Image (spheres, rainbow, N blue to C red):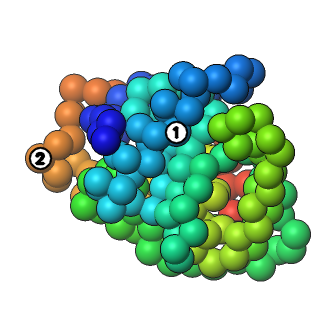
Amino acid sequence: MSIQPIRIYGDPVLRTAAEEVDTFDRELRGLVKDLLDTMRDEGGAGLAAPQLGVSKRVFTFDVDDVVGHIVNPVLEFPDEEEQDGREGCLSLPGLYFDTVRRQNVIAKGFNEYGDPLQIVGTGMMARCLQHETDHLDGIIFIDRLDPERRKAAMAEIRAQDWYNDDVTVKVSPHDSKGVFFKS
């Protein structure tokens, strides 16, 4: 097993867009193994490379007995249907907040060998694919919360033993709601 430490909220790597993978080699396969082993050890539904401090566009998932990974994912949304439900993150240990996501998603990317793949997700799998792809874009799920929920979430985060109040967390002045919120 190759279990690695998970970066916690406030670490700048979690707010940085990851680089596309352009080499499908032994190093990438090692990263996928580290992600899988660490995700399983922590009991997570997904884990993105930036959460291990690696700025590469790859993540693993384990949802409804479907275990896998995707490299350089691009998401497509086949409809406008939404879901609102509990969401957590291994980088915000022990915290869960209701988050609006799209109900259905198609993720296109590659496996660890560079072969194209497509994952069609609904419900929890769709939530996971969106959550982990957000990590690759430097977005943490609390960024998707409406202002009232975000304020409550930040209060809970600041109350955690692991929270480092020396870290300045900046919220983007740009609308990050995108297609994930109802008007």
Up-down relation of residue 70 to residue 171 (above or below)? below
Specify the quadrant of the image occupied by residue 23. top right
Check disc 2: other Cα within 10 Å, few if <14, some if 14-19, many if 20+: few
Q: Is residue 7 above or below residue 59?
A: above
* Residue in front for this viewpoint, 72 or 169: 72
As drawn, is 90 to the left or to the right of 17?
A: left
Q: Secondary structure at mark 2?
A: loop
Quadrant into which the N terminus falls:
top left
Residue type indicated by callout 2: Asp
Q: CA distance from mark 2 to mark 1?
A: 30 Å
Furthest residue in direction left, as rendered: 161
Callout 1 crowding tier (Cα within 10 Å): few <14, some 14–19, many ≥20? many
Residue occupying the point 22% across, 48% down: 158
Secondary element under disc 1, as helix, strand or loop, is helix
Q: Residue at x 58, y 56 (%)?
A: 68
In the shown orientation, is residue 148 left or right of residue 18?
A: left
Residue at 83 percent across and 45 percent down: it is: 116
Residue 141 appearing in the image:
no
Q: Quadrant of the C terminus?
A: bottom right
Is residue 95 visible in this depiction of the protein? Answer: yes
**Viewer-nearest of discs 2 and 1:** 1
Image coordinates of residue 44 in percent, x first then y, are 38, 60
Q: Earlier in the sequence, mark 2 or mark 1?
A: 1
Q: Nearer the viewer, residue 51 or 134?
A: 51
Marking on residue 32: 1
> Can you identify the residue that label 2 sits on?
161
